[in-house]
Amino acid sequence: MGKLRRGQERKDFVTEGDKETMSAVADYVWRIILMFGTVPAALTYYWRMKMPETARYTALIARNAKQAAADMSKVLHTQIEESADRAETVAVGGESWGLFSRQFLRRHGLHLLATTSTWFLLDIAFYSQNLFQKDIFSKVGWIPPAKTMNALEELYRIARAQALIALCGTIPGYWFTVAFIEIMGRFWIQIMGFAMMTAFMLGLAIPYHHWTTRGHHTGFIVMYGFTFFFANFGPNSTTFIVPAEIYPARLRMYGKKIIMAGSQLNVLVKLDQAKTQWYHFMAIVIAGMGFFTDAYDLFCIALVTKLLGRLYYTDITKPNPGTLPPNVSSAVTGVALCGTLAGQLFFGWLGDKLGRKSVYGFTLILMVVCSIASGLSFGHTPKSVIATLCFFRFWLGFGIGGDYPLSATIMSEYASKKTRGAFIAAVFAMQGFGILFGAIVALVVSAGFRHAYPAPSYAQNPAASLAPQADYTWRLILMFGTIPAGLTYYWRMKMPETARYTALVARNAKQAAADMSKVLHAEIEERPEVVESQVVAGETWGLFSRQFMKRHGMHLLATTSTWFLLDIAFYSQNLFQKDIFSKVGWIPPAKTMNALEELYRISRAQALIALCGTIPGYWFTVAFIDIVGRFWIQIMGFFMMTVFMLALGVPYDHWTHPAHHTGFVVLYALTFFFANFGPNSTTFIVPAEIFPARLRSTCHGISAASGKAGAIIGAFGFLYAAQDQHNPDAGYSRGIGIRNALFVLAGTNFLGMLMTLLVPESKGLSLEEMSKDNVVDETAQEAIAQA
């Protein structure tokens, strides 16, 4: 009561105080606000005056090419000299027609009409929105009526509202343009911006009375913020940029960028132009068998986790068979992914330091040994068996992680530029056969043991349903995948180091030519002057340098973010198929089966999904990657995954009825099809193509590790998130349910589609063209000439 009284006294003091004093104070406020903007501008005055005249004005308008060269030599910190004949050419060839001439109208009349009309129309809308935000906010009730506030409070509320719009819509829009302008182009950004502004304006106007009612103000502000976002990630930026680029220098500075490229090594030209030969298929099989084992080992664990729960955690006094406790299930499922993440980073870096071949054999040995050791996991108690299994699966994952950057890099550096995408995709497509082979092995082993040791269901006889021999099945399944990979070890060791590593990183072009002469069965000789150019032009900037960030920083963001988002969804779907199939009734309740029958049914379901969705998706990518391109396949894949996730999630209750189970499985299989004929393949391919040779394996490893971070989130997060909101499994807390989890995965896929806009297209280009490797600048050219 005392606090209320004191608060009332303060209010009375404010409302009954000296109003003239407040008015005088408020008068200073607007003056200070108007003047404050001069401070940052004034601070730049000195540097603005220190800037030299632009080289294009000095050279093309003032006709003083030598002065332009001198000015830019200081700016670029390099020696630039203009020959007299080139300067004379500029002076003689200069055109003199003016702004109102027939020549200008013929060349640029439509351009000027386009830039003036679009900027005119844009600013009608843009300034209307900006200058009258305060009135709009008042109309929809986001700012209280003026009579309920004093002058300074009203100013405060208007400023706060404008700051929120700027933070959430205006500023992000500008920087999205910065990020995407060189990828999407001016035209498409401007078209998209006008279209989205139109859509959001209609979205505000048509249901306007809806927005003015209390409770809907936030929705109005969100929509209003989007109009600012798409104005700035759209025509407000592009109408400013385009006129600065399309007119002649003397009317609106215009020039051409001159690119100097060095001579290409003969061995790299031969590789890029090589027809498909036997060694290409050998490389696909050798590298692909590693991925066959990778997929087998990573995904077969999902088949046996329910069996492990029955064997080691069943209490026969309870009505349902045992399941792995949440922490144990998370560890068994996720520990290999943690090892994979670490291996991708370590072996990716090592592949650039020591060479691709040097560490390629070690990763295979590690996978084979740890797969066998996983099957031989020992212990006197369930905890010790699981702990041993987790230990070996971590190191299995470590070896698998090494195979990602090394296999992708090796295949990209062996392939020709016309078929490179298909060959890398074919290596990755071996994952599909690995997943299918795991399901087939589990089917055969479980069927054999079930026939040899028949047992009743858990509901009939809990103790007898757990045949002791079932303990052998999961061990055999885990070990069996090592056989195909082990058979390729000899051929993996016989492969020569890739020519691109030998020539561009180890700087031994002659050895690269000798190695590839044997592979291509053709004589390859390197000219001494071209070999010398590689030494002179060799760049040494590293992964964390400003030069790398300038050239490839956005590329690395694109490959890491898209792979991260993809693997959240992809591994969630793959590792927990058994739970989803049980929820929708495609697999009967656990208590109606014995341990081996449950394993058989889960394996059969996974085999069907692999045959109908997973494997066709991989090979569609192989067929179309060099026709459609990486970018569009990835966009399409993310989009279709989003659509099918929503198609599963929105009518989820419909799919749980027994008559609709087949429809659910068909849609679920289509998400796998478009994952593999989409981002699951392209996120593996692109990082192997767009980075320079000396950092290619490292950057692929970083991208893949980002993906595995997403897989870990998917593996651990989905396990808990998919639990029923009202009746979770024993040991689990309440989750959001499978329906809501599907919505989350749909949102994840949609974000992946947006981040794909940062991914460059590498179709039909050589690795050196994509990565800007092997580029010789003027200084290098002079050094070569003097050599």
Image (cartoon, rainbow, N blue to C red):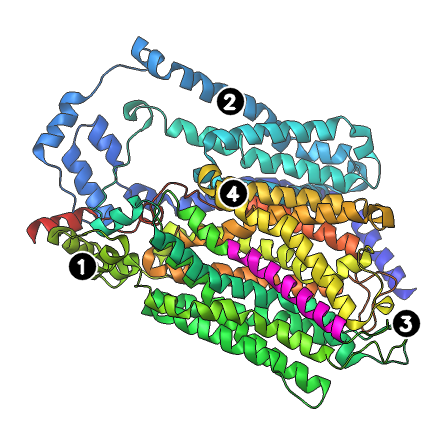
- Amino acid carrying label 4: it is Leu
In three-dimensional space, the C-alpha distance between marks 1 and 3, rounded to whole angstroms, equals 72 Å
As helix, strand or loop, the secondary structure at mark 1 comes to helix
In three-dimensional space, the C-alpha distance between marks 4 and 3, rounded to whole angstroms, equals 54 Å
In the image, is 236 to the left or to the right of 651? left
The label nearer to you, 3 versus 2, is 3
Q: What segment is highlighted magenta in the picture? A: 429-452
In the image, is 392 to the left or to the right of 537? right
The label nearer to you, 2 versus 1, is 1
In three-dimensional space, the C-alpha distance between marks 4 and 2, rounded to whole angstroms, equals 25 Å
* Residue 167, x across and y down, in percent: 60, 46
Residue behind mark 3: 459
The label nearer to you, 1 versus 3, is 3
Instruction: Tell me which numbered mark, 4 or 3, is placed earlier along the sequence.
Output: 3
* Residue 1, x across and y down, in percent: 92, 64
In three-dimensional space, the C-alpha distance between marks 4 and 1, rounded to whole angstroms, equals 40 Å
Residue 175 visible in the snapshot: no
In the image, is 373 to the left or to the right of 422? right
Which quadrant would the C terminus be assigned to in this image? Answer: bottom left
Where residue 118 is drawn, which disc sits there? 2
Residue 308 visible in the snapshot: yes
Residue behind mark 4: 757
In three-dimensional space, the C-alpha distance between marks 2 and 1, rounded to whole angstroms, equals 57 Å
Rendered view: 335 above or below 439: below
- Amino acid carrying label 1: it is Lys
Where residue 510 is drawn, which disc sits there? 1
- Amino acid carrying label 2: it is Thr
In the image, is 162 to the left or to the right of 584? left
